[in-house]
């Protein structure tokens, strides 16, 4: 070790009380790491263990900023735990589903106690002592319950802390700031304004009423034990966008970043001029290295997901008197306090949804069709000369339903593939988990659409209770169908014979015989508009109307409700090509405003990769 570094280490070690700092630092120095980088690693990992810090240093061995004397930024938050936190988390999930994401979703539920401030790496341990001293000082006067009052404005929704309790909490923040200044030489600015716990911030004005109704189902009197939590973040990336890596990626060029699932990427929106379409330039949180990466291998993360939790101080009654300062509180799942896992309460989720059930329209594209995988000649691959069906590949359906025009009838009306059936069931399972109340189901007469609706209803446990209303008016644009005649589709009797629960009483807006071959674009969008208006008018009650149709229906069946004119036909064709199997659009009626609005679907999208055919004989002979 260099003489200068030895002196620095001795100086640091003499200032720290006890042997905790030395016990963490010694193993790192013994591995040959310099003092300043070892301290930097400990600060960046929340001073958990020497092993965690050593892993961080090994990952950052090529980090060009490793030797830069840039400290972390720290902040102190008052955070709820227990039943109140559970309710707040449910509110956030439901508000994001119904009203899309807003600024409040970037950070866990909290009351801010001070602005972010910097602390030198060698003095971080003193911050922990400052937190403990301030907590011990205010423990006797800290309120057992913190009264909260709901406040709403055009761009903010949240709870204000009652002034009596707020005064005590502000005193705690001031005590921490004073202790941090004395012990760690930090300049901390405690919060002196109205203390608040944000529910939603910077949302669209037309979502205000929905958010208020959702917040009305929250009861701030729920049992809660409050904790003061000390977090840090990398100050260099405060204004960057944060992406979460979903899939592994091996670089193909020297200027590309390797990606590992679970890593985070910091992206500066102002430095993307050199990136090609579909790519971004970012810095890996795991390694500190910079490079190009495919954006579709990532997803947007929350701002707080990369924050590091250092220590907490628990107020209120504690089972263990030694648990006031929790050295293991720095969870590796950064950014949010995680109480013990409990079974998800469907009752509590449905209570939130019951607060804001509106008439809605969920338009879903059908699952993967068999000719989408095996081409137009798929029937030649699975039928004998005498017209009998067999299964040449596991992605072919197990069997085909009987139809009057024989197996050749499937050429213009193909069924779902086995994967398409699986996709439909997954979507139904997700809808069941979301708790959305389905009030009616409509389907295009195409077999692939009716089958998709059937499997979705099966997972919703509604296949026997709810009949599928077959509506030819939402069939695909016939100009895109092969042939000069209208496609021959299965009759209701044939569908019922195939054990599909279709309604024979429903009167469609457009009978099957009214479908004309090679119709114009205006004729197509007009029949879709008439059909969707009839569907909505026949379902006046609140709840979700499920429509299973084609990719084109996600546009042609929603724009009439939204009051939008049809797209240009060329733009329409380009848009439809990008819609995947089980793609969804969700419209919600706003009765107060007298209009329909496009909102986030109740379930996430389904993404998966391809799986090409494999011939083992060619593999053996090719070896």
Image: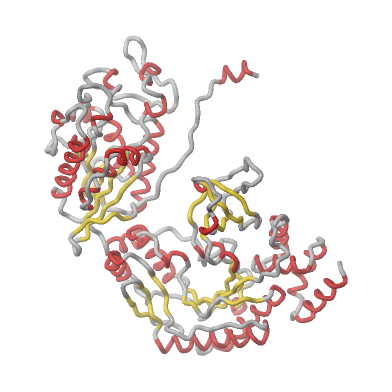
Query: Which residue is drawn at the image coordinates 21% and 51% (left, top)?
Result: 561
Q: How far across and down, in percent of the image, does residue 118 sit?
A: 62, 76
Q: How far across and down, in percent of the image, does residue 73 sit?
A: 60, 72
Regarding residue 453, the answer to whether it shows in the image is no
Of residues 293 and 369, the one drawn nearer to the viewer in this rendering: 293
Of residues 407 and 583, the one drawn nearer to the viewer in this rendering: 583
| Rendered position, 23 above or below 241 | below
Colour scheme in use:
secondary structure
Q: How many marks?
A: 0
Quadrant hosting residue 27: bottom right
Of residues 487 and 212, the one drawn nearer to the viewer in this rendering: 487
Q: How far across and down, in percent of the image, does residue 381 sit?
A: 40, 17
Query: Which residue is drawn at the image coordinates 23% and 45% (left, top)?
Result: 566
Q: Residue furthest right?
A: 3
Quadrant hosting residue 519: top left
Image quarter of the C terminus:
top right
Query: Which residue is drawn at the image coordinates 26% and 52% (left, top)?
Result: 587
Regarding residue 289, the answer to whether it shows in the image is yes
Tell me: 170 left or right of 433. Answer: right
Tell me: 9 left or right of 509. Answer: right
| Rendered position, 274 above or below 520 | below
| Rendered position, 246 above or below 79 | above
Q: How far across and down, in percent of the image, does residue 20 sit?
A: 73, 74
Q: Residue furthest top?
A: 385
Query: Which residue is drawn at the image coordinates 70% and 58% (left, top)?
Result: 64
Image quarter of the N terminus:
bottom right
| Rendered position, 233 above or below 435 | below
């Amino acid at each position: 070790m260099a003489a200068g570094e030895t002196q620095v280490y001795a100086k640091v070690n003499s200032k720290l009380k006890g042997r905790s700092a030395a016990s963490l630092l010694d193993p790192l120095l013994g591995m040959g790491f310099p003092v300043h980088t070892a301290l930097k690693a400990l600060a960046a990992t929340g001073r958990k263990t020497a092993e965690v810090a050593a892993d961080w240093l090994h990952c950052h061995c090529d980090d060009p900023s490793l030797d830069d004397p840039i400290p972390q930024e720290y902040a102190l938050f008052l955070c709820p735990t227990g039943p109140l936190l559970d309710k707040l988390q449910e509110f956030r999930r439901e508000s994001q589903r119904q009203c899309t994401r807003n600024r409040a979703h970037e950070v866990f539920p909290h009351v801010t106690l001070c602005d972010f401030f910097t602390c030198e790496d060698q003095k971080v341990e003193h911050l922990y002592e400052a937190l403990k001293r301030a907590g011990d000082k205010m423990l006797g006067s800290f309120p057992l319950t913190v009264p909260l009052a709901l406040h709403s404005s055009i761009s903010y929704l949240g709870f204000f802390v009652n002034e009596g309790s707020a005064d005590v909490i502000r005193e705690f923040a001031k005590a921490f700031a004073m202790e941090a200044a004395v012990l760690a030489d930090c300049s901390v600015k405690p919060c002196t304004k109205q203390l608040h716990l944000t529910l939603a911030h910077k949302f669209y004005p037309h979502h205000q009423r929905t958010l208020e109704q959702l917040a009305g189902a929250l009861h701030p009197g729920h049992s809660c034990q409050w904790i003061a939590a000390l977090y840090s973040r990398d100050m260099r990336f405060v204004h960057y966008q944060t992406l979460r890596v979903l899939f592994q990626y091996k670089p193909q060029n020297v200027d590309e970043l390797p990606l590992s699932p679970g890593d985070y990427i910091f992206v500066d929106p102002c430095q993307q001029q050199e990136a090609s379409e579909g790519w971004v330039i970012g810095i890996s949180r795991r390694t500190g290295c910079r490079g190009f990466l495919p954006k579709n291998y990532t997803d947007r993360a929350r701002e707080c997901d990369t924050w590091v939790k250092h220590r907490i101080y628990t107020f209120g009654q504690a089972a263990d008197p030694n648990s006031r300062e929790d050295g293991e509180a720095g969870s590796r799942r950064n950014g949010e306090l995680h109480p013990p896992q409990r079974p998800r309460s469907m009752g509590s989720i449905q209570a939130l949804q019951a607060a804001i059930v509106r008439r809605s329209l969920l338009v879903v594209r059908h699952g993967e069709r068999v000719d989408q995988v095996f081409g137009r000649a798929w029937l030649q691959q699975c039928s004998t000369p005498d017209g009998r069906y067999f299964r040449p590949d596991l992605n072919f359906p197990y069997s085909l339903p009987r139809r009057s025009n024989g197996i050749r009838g499937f050429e213009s009306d193909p069924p779902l593939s086995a994967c398409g059936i699986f996709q439909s069931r997954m979507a139904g399972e997700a809808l069941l988990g979301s708790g959305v109340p389905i009030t009616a189901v409509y389907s295009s007469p195409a077999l692939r659409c009716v089958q998709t609706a059937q499997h979705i209803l099966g997972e919703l446990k509604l296949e026997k209770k709810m009949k599928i209303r077959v509506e030819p008016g939402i069939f695909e644009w016939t100009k895109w169908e092969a042939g000069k005649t209208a496609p021959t589709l299965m009759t209701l009797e044939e569908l019922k014979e195939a054990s599909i629960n279709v309604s024979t009483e429903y009167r469609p807006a457009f009978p099957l015989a009214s479908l004309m071959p090679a119709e114009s674009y205006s004729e197509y969008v007009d029949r879709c508009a008439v059909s969707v208006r009839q569907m909505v008018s026949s379902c006046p009650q609140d709840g979700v109307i499920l429509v299973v149709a084609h990719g084109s229906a996600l546009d042609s069946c929603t724009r009439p409700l939204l009051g939008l004119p049809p797209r240009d036909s060329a733009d329409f064709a380009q848009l439809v090509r990008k819609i995947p199997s089980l793609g969804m659009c969700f419209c919600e009626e706003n009765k107060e405003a007298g209009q329909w609005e496009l909102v986030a679907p109740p379930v996430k999208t389904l993404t998966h990769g391809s799986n090409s055919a494999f011939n083992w004989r060619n593999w053996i002979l090719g070896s």
